[in-house]
Amino acid sequence: MSGVPALLDCYHTMIFDPQPHEGDEVYCRQCGDYRTVTSAHASWTLRCSACPLARGYGADEHEARRRAIRHANKFPGHVVRIRKAGHVVGKVSASGESTTDLLEWLKDHPNHQSGLRSIVTKL
Ligand SMILES: [Zn+2]
Ligand SMILES: [Zn+2]
């Protein structure tokens, strides 16, 4: 199959050929409804509530989450939102205001658990 995958605002992905534009309305067969293309490539970004941190990591979820955790640990009080294609999928802060999403991720990445113990024990 040729074409490019695009993420819709319902989190379903579809293969398009040619590549769609962000904001295009397309029919999602899985929803049975029209949805908006949020990004042709699911990009991961971080945004901090307390400082101007706002960075994109492309398709590198691993790095985005790692940086979010590091930032939250370094700057107490900062809540870092992890966004996938514009959707907030997780929050990280040193006070433990983290989502189950992060815990799920840790289960899949056990090699990160030791480094993240300070956050996880507060959950
Ligand atoms: Zn859908
Ligand atoms: Zn910050």
Image: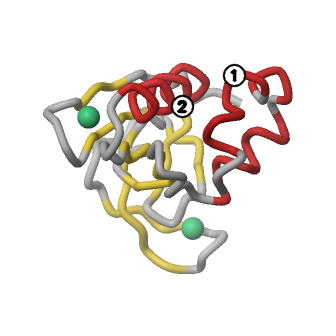
> How many labels sit on residues?
2
Q: In the rendering, at what x and y percent does residue 89 appear?
A: 50, 54
Q: In the rendering, at what x and y percent does residue 66 appear?
A: 55, 24
Q: In the rendering, at what x and y percent does residue 71 appear?
A: 39, 27
Q: In the rendering, at what x and y percent does residue 97 appear?
A: 50, 57
Residue drawn 83% across the image and 21% down it: 111
Q: Which residue is mark 2?
A: 65
Which secondary structure, mark 1? helix
| Residue 62 tag number | none
Real-space Cα separation, disc 1 to disc 2, in angstroms: 13 Å
Which secondary structure, mark 2? helix
Q: Determine crowd level at label 2: few under 14, some 14-19, many 20+ residues with C-alpha closer than 10 A.
A: many
26 above or below 50? below
41 above or below 20? above
Question: In screen coordinates, is 110 left or right of 9?
Answer: right
Q: What's the amino acid at mark 1? A: Gly
Question: In screen coordinates, is 7 left or right of 2?
Answer: left
Q: Which residue is mark 1?
A: 115
